[in-house]
Amino acid sequence: MARYHMKRSEKEISERNALINVLRKGKYATVAMCRNNEPYVVTMNYGYDEGESALYFHCSLKGLKLDMIGENPSVCASVIEDLGYRMGECEQAYRSVVLWGKMYVVDDLQEKKHGIDVLLNQLEDEPDRVRERSLKSDEAYQKVGIMRLDITEMSGKQGE
């Protein structure tokens, strides 16, 4: 699919490290999915795995998201770093990243544990306390749904 060029090139974030910094700081992503010409958008917490160039999400073991990606794993997502509205200037300061890729359900127990670790390390101040309290056995991990978005392309934009 051909991508459009950004009209205001001065707002483009083209440096990969800057894009990754937005993903590292973020807590949630809005993910767009589609099946049979039926769109669906959902906002979810995520963890970014730089080595895998992937986002991990937790979810239910059943539901619309899983049905949608089962039929069409191609997704588009956005992460926004809100830097504040500038009162009286009618301007918003922000940095955003748009991601394209494929979303998969993680079934393998070891990858599921890895995905949960990625999530907890990004979202929690004390991830070990959550693990100790909620993830005491392999059975506990099996009760959590995990999805992985393999990033194939990303672009960024900023406003000051």
Image (cartoon, grey):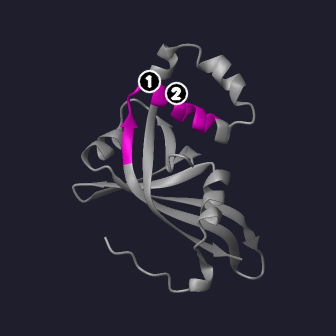
Q: Secondary structure at mark 2?
A: helix
Where is residue 160 drawn, in percent x and y?
71, 77
User: Within the image, what quadrant is residue 96 found in?
Assistant: bottom right
Amino acid on which the number 2 mark rests in the picture: Lys
Return the residue found at the far left: 36
In the depicted structure, whether residue 138 falls above or below residue 4? above
In the depicted structure, whether residue 5 falls above or below residue 85? below
* Membership of 155 in magenta stretch: no
* Membership of 107 in magenta stretch: yes
- Left or right: residue 158 versus residue 97 is right
Relative depth, front residue between 90 and 138 = 138
User: Within the image, what quadrant is residue 157 found in?
Assistant: bottom right
Amino acid on which the number 1 mark rests in the picture: Leu
Callout 2: few (<14), some (14-19), or many (20+) C-alpha neighbours within 10 Å?
some
Q: Main secondary structure of the magenta part?
A: helix
Q: Residue at x 47, y 14 (%)?
A: 139
- Asked whether disc 1 touches disc 2, contact meaning CB atoms under 8 Å apart, the reply is yes
Mark pair 1, 2: CA separation: 6 Å
- The magenta region covers 103-120
Where is residue 65 drawn, in percent x and y?
37, 43
Relative depth, front residue between 12 and 160 = 12
Q: Where's the N terminus, which quadrant?
A: bottom left
Q: Residue at x 64, y 73 (%)?
A: 158
Callout 1: few (<14), some (14-19), or many (20+) C-alpha neighbours within 10 Å?
few
Q: Which mark is residue 33?
A: none
User: Within the image, what quadrant is residue 11 found in?
Assistant: bottom right
Q: Which residue is mark 2?
A: 113
Q: Which mark is residue 109?
A: 1
Q: Residue at x 51, y 17 (%)?
A: 140
Where is residue 120 drawn, in percent x and y?
63, 34
